Structures are given as C-alpha cells and as structure tokens.
C-alpha cells in the first residue's frame, strides 16, 4: 500500500544485467484494466539506479543534434550508435520485458524495441504536433523520463478523435509511461515552458526480431 509521500512500488525494472518483473494475479488484472480504460499505465522506477546513473553520465549536451520529423516536429536527438542509446537499447530488448508488455496490453508477440534519446527545450523552434505512430510494425509505445533537472510543461498528451486530450505528467527520472498505439489515438508532447525535457522513447515492434538482427552481422563476418 502506498502512503502519502512514499513512492509507488516498481512493477517492472530494467537494467544492464537483468529485468525484474514480478506481478501477482491481482496486480496484473489491475494493470490490464487500467490500460484498457485509459490507454496507458505508469511504470515507476522503470530504470534501475545503476542504468539511470550511467545514462545520465553519458548524456552530454554536445551529443545532441537537431532533428526534424516532417509533419510531426523538431527535437534534439542523440545519434543511434552514441551513448547512452546502445545501453538503453540492450536493456529494453529483454524477453522478460516483452512478456510483461504483452500481458498488460494484450498486444501480439513483440520482436524488438526501437528507441531514441531526445531532448525538447523550452524554445519555440522545437515542438511535437499531434500524430499517430501506429505504423512500421509498431505495437505499443514507451516513454522514459531521463531529465536530470526539473522542467515545466512537456506533458505527454493522448487524444481519441474529438475528445479532450488526456494529459500525462511523468516527472520522476527513471519512471516510464507505456501507452497504446492506434490509428484513432493521436499523441504529442505539449510545449516545454521552462528547462529541457529529456527522454528515451520508442516502440515495441512485432518485427524485426532483436536477437536475429544483432546475430546476423556476426554470422556474416564468420562466413
């Protein structure tokens, strides 16, 4: 039971060594109902403290470059092969995490997670417009707070059709939000009003298979 001022318990936690996901039937049923009703669930302490510290240490501002997503927005992004992206990619491509997400969301079999580290400053030149990511074999989306300092604004917003948007604040570093992808459900990041919002975000996908994708280059070199 969570008391006033205390942190909610971790439901699933990923690190460089392993993924811990221990849910009893009651917790599982509650998460499934919440995801069905709201199209998202919060995952407190999603990154373990060691991985979070390593990510923050590697996440120097000189590694970020302006990136435009046509028709969607403009952000600062770290190149895929630069730290801390590889360590976060390895941690989130876990079979135990895949099974956890499949159970909670009811999505089909997950083959891989594809993510990026990005920053959204409080500057009118950077923005994220309403869009859907329900394409390219994407099943479910994940956003992890990597911000080393507080910021204002920058909430994740979900909107179904003409309904008012649902605003989801994720203010604690290392916490995550898992949310539905659907052609009728759009989302965006609200403008950041002060500071900079840093995150690791991406999609659980049906393909490619992560293990196959990293082992194929090794096989090719051995031929």
Image: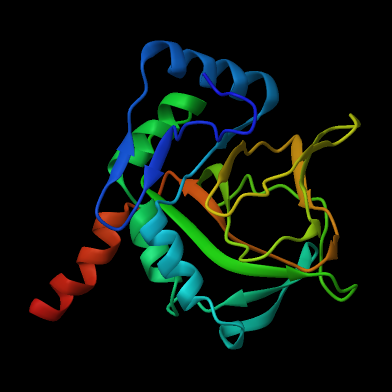
> Number of numbered discs present?
0
Q: Is residue 131 visible?
A: yes
Is residue 168 shown above or below 41? Answer: below
- Left or right of 170? Residue 8 is left
- Left or right of 215? Residue 201 is right
The picture places residue 68, in percent across and down from the top left corner, at: 73, 75
In the picture, the quarter occupied by the C terminus is: bottom left
- Residue lying at 58% horizontally and 15% vertically, measured from the top left: 33
The picture places residue 137, in percent across and down from the top left corner, at: 50, 47
Q: Is residue 69 visible?
A: no
Colour setting: rainbow
- Residue lying at 76% horizontally and 45% vertically, measured from the top left: 187
**Residue projecting furthest to the left:** 223
User: Residue 149 falls in which quadrant of the image?
Assistant: bottom right
The picture places residue 171, in percent across and down from the top left corner, at: 68, 49
- Left or right of 156? Residue 147 is left
Is residue 96 shown above or below 150? Answer: above
User: Residue 165 falls in which quadrant of the image?
Assistant: top right
- Residue lying at 51% horizontally and 60% vertically, measured from the top left: 115
The picture places residue 36, in percent across and down from the top left corner, at: 62, 20
Towards the viewer: 88 or 133: 88
């Amino acid at each position: 039971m969570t008391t006033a001022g205390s942190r909610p318990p971790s439901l699933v936690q990923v690190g460089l060594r392993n993924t811990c996901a221990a849910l009893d039937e009651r917790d599982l049923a509650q998460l499934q109902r919440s995801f069905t009703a709201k199209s998202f669930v919060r995952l407190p302490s999603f990154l373990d403290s060691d991985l979070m510290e390593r990510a923050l240490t590697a996440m120097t501002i000189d590694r970020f470059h302006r990136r435009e997503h046509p028709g969607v927005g403009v952000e600062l992004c770290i190149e895929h092969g630069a730290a801390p992206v590889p360590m976060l990619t390895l941690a989130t491509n876990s079979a135990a995490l895949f099974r956890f997400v499949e159970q909670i969301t009811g999505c089909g079999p997950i083959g891989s997670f594809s993510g990026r580290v990005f920053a959204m400053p409080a500057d009118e030149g950077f923005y994220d417009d309403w869009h859907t990511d329900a394409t390219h074999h994407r099943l479910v989306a994940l956003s992890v707070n990597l911000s080393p300092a507080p910021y204002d604004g920058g909430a994740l917003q979900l909107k179904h059709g003409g309904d008012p948007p649902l605003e989801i604040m994720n203010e604690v570093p290392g916490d995550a939000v898992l949310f539905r992808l659907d052609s009728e459900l759009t989302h965006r990041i609200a403008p950041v009003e002060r500071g900079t919002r840093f995150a690791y975000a991406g999609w659980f996908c049906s393909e490619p298979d992560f293990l196959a994708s990293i082992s194929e280059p090794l096989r090719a070199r051995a031929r």
